[in-house]
Image (tube, rainbow, N blue to C red):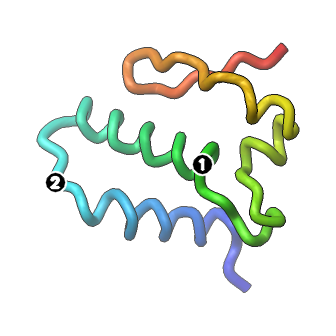
C-alpha cells in the first residue's frame, strides 16, 4: 500500500517540480508555495468527498473567508 505522503510527494514532483526550471531558491519557494496553496485550498479531492483539505481541516465556514496574505513566498494561515 502506498502511503499518503508518497502520493502527495509524487503529485508535487510531477505537477510542479519536474515541469519548472527554477532560476533560484526564491523562485522555487514561490512556485511550491503557490502549488501547495492551490493543492490545499482550491483542488477538490475525491477521497475527501470532493472538498479541499482546507475545508476538511478548518471547516466549511473558514473556506468562505478571504485567503490570508503571504509573506516571503510562504503561505500563512491564522487560526483563531
Separation of residues labelled 1 and 2 (CA atoms):
24 Å
Q: Quadrant of residue 17?
A: bottom left
Q: Badge 2 is on which residue?
A: 21
Q: Position of residue 69 (x, y in %)?
A: 52, 17
Q: Nearer the viewer, residue 34 or 5?
A: 34
Which of pointers 1 and 2 lies earlier in the amino acid sequence?
2
Q: Residue at x 25, y 63 (%)?
A: 19
Dots 1, 2 in contact, CB < 8 A? no
Classify 69 as above or below 7: above
Q: Residue at x 38, y 18 (%)?
A: 72
Q: Quadrant of residue 46?
A: bottom right
For the residue labelled by badge 2, is the local secondary structure a helix, a strand or a loop?
Answer: loop
Q: Position of residue 43 (x, y in %)?
A: 60, 56
Q: Badge 1 is on which residue?
A: 42
Q: Nearer the viewer, residue 39 or 4?
A: 39
Classify 61 as above or below 10: above
Mark 1 or 2: in front is 1
In this rendering, position of residue 72 left or right of residue 60 = left
Quadrant of the frame with the C terminus: top right
Q: Position of residue 58 (x, y in %)?
A: 83, 35
Q: Residue at x 16, y 54 (%)?
A: 21
Classify 70 as above or below 51: above
Q: Residue furthest bottom?
A: 1
Classify 32 as above or below 16: above
Amino acid at each position: 500500500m502506498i502511503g499518503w505522503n508518497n502520493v502527495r510527494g509524487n503529485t508535487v514532483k510531477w505537477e510542479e517540480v519536474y515541469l519548472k526550471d527554477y532560476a533560484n531558491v526564491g523562485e522555487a519557494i514561490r512556485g511550491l508555495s503557490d502549488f501547495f496553496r492551490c493543492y490545499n485550498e482550491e483542488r477538490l479531492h475525491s477521497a475527501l468527498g470532493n472538498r479541499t483539505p482546507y475545508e476538511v481541516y478548518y471547516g466549511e465556514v473558514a473556506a468562505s473567508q478571504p485567503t490570508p496574505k503571504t509573506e516571503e513566498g510562504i503561505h500563512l494561515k491564522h487560526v483563531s
